[in-house]
Amino acid sequence: RKAVAETDDRKAAPVAPEELRSHQWYGTDGLRSFSHRARTRQLGYLPEEHLGKPVIAVLNTWSDINPCHSHLRERAQAVKRGVWQAGGFPLEFPVSTLSETFQKPTPMLYRNLLAMETEELLRSYPVDGAVLLGGCDKSTPALLMGAASVDLPTVFVPAGPMLPGHWRNEVLGSGTDMWKYWDERRAGLIGDCEMGELENGLARSAGHCMTMGTASTLTAAAEALGVTLPGASSIPAVDSGHDRMAAGSGLRIVELVKQRTTLSHILTADAYEDAVATVLALGGSTNAVIHLIAMAGRSGVKLTLDDFDRIARTVPVLADLRPGGRYLMEDFHFAGGLPGFLSRIADVLHLDRPTVAHATLREQLDGAAVHNSAVIRERTEPLAEEGGVAVLRGNLCPDGAVIKHIAAEPHLLRHTGPAVVFDDYREMQRTINDPALALTSDHVLVLRNAGPQGGPGMPEYGMLPIPDYLLKQGVRDMVRISDARMSGTSYGACVLHIAPESFVGGPLALVRTGDLITLDVEARLLHLGVDDDELERRRAAWSPPPARYGRGYGALYQDQITQADTGCDFAFLARQGEVPDPYVG
Ligand code: FES
Ligand code: MG
């Protein structure tokens, strides 16, 4: 394989120093430029260290509270090392961190805030190109949404998966095995001593969740889109290769600036189709549906739920990764990583499109191979014949819903049962274990007011808990439906993202306990067995709940948030429109 800096064959006359966007700040003969140069001296730089060089913003989502990004301070140094060596001038910008584990009610409430911060920061400072460091769930789409709206040359540095978890000679997946052993504890099968050991063993190093959860899914999508270096997304966070990838990204971004390869050259409709195919063939997280639709929107590409369903029918699931399968991201990495994986679905990809590293994806995949077909299956031995997410329609979800059917017990994929309705998550938590509810494994658990507005922020409540007494009877899965999302590390027959959500009057708001609900994944159907007249009567009696926020960011959010089927972007960010150049000279 050629070295990173040698791999591009796009031949344009390189950008001259006066053409750089940052020239307006540093290079003109005016009071402002004088002031900017004086202030750069104040920062301790000589003129020859920065004048005429591409300014590269290194956007860092590191924080003391984010265990998935705790190594990104050092990685930013490696990026800067690469930028310096390629003749650029790196400047690191701390941006807000979205920690899936700690931020409440859910970092999804703040994805668009980081996207706004990314966009406005890149626009308002003297930036010629950007390197984005993130990986924990929403940070990947947030950074790329903001960057796409600015359209500078951009490279994404994925945070990389943490090391595999370990407990008593068992390999653990973060998230996935946390849910599993919490259920084992509720079933009375393990005690506090074991839980203490699990606490030590579940998450052993810096890095994002090492299952094919939302983080791995979205960083793989970023690589499939072509905005990372080849193979970047699966490199374990603490592997020295991760530092080398970061340095390589620094080298590469300077070349992209010189070649004028902005993000819109990479983030094309073809690229988004390939990212969808990748996510589905990985058996990736349902959250990717919302995020890719939102990201595409920022790129001026219309991606819909129907595109997911259409593409799902063209790709098999080939990655045997938890939560749907057996292995973890480190296994995937050594099995060939995403380049190896993409080589197995190359027939459905658009191979003539560019990436940040190569003139074509075809060239990028040249020589890519799979080294372990247990982890990345042969096409003749798929885990599922069709992609891992199905899009449902029906009178309960006129604008769609999704289910990750490969992570559900197969007997539930065609099921009719009586609804048990919970109006809010906390009420459900309080009452779900009450034997008076007399739930059976046939019941359909329904949670509402957990969508983009109702949650608020569409929390990952969608894997509703199975009552303790059913767990003790050996029940491990039930049909559960909601307008919430589900963690990418979760599993079960969970219908998610019902649109429109109940909080804004979607039909989910009209369901009553005892109504029959039918799920039929093969027919792509979610049906409420109540006739239209009765639904109209219920609608007439329904009144919208009071707004969640009286002021602040939440008020902006509830005013602007769109529904799940269109990606939950803010309406004023998703729309097309001119933004003036900020430089006033
Ligand atoms: Fe950060 Fe899972 S908690 S990726
Ligand atoms: Mg997650």
Image (tube, helix red, strand yellow):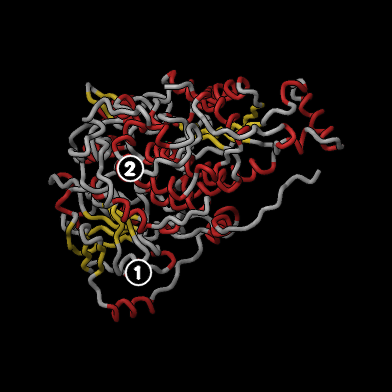
Position in image of residue 507 (x %, y %): 35, 69
Position in image of residue 53 (x %, y %): 69, 28
Residue reaching furthest to the left: 473
Occupied quadrant, residue 78? top right
Give me the residue at 42% from left, 32% from top. Answer: 364
Q: Amino acid at mark 2?
A: Gly
Position in image of residue 306 (x %, y %): 35, 59
- Foreground: 148 or 398? 148
Q: Is residue 512 above or below residue 36?
A: below
Q: Secondary structure at mark 1?
A: helix
Q: Is residue 126 left or right of residue 494?
A: right
Give me the residue at 51% from left, 24% from top. Answer: 6
Q: Amino acid at mark 1?
A: Pro
- Foreground: 125 or 110? 125
First-in-chain label (2 vs 1): 2
Residue at which label 2 appears: 284
- Foreground: 327 or 503? 327
Residue at which label 1 appears: 507
Label 2 crowd bin: few (<14), some (14–19), many (20+), radius 10 Å: many
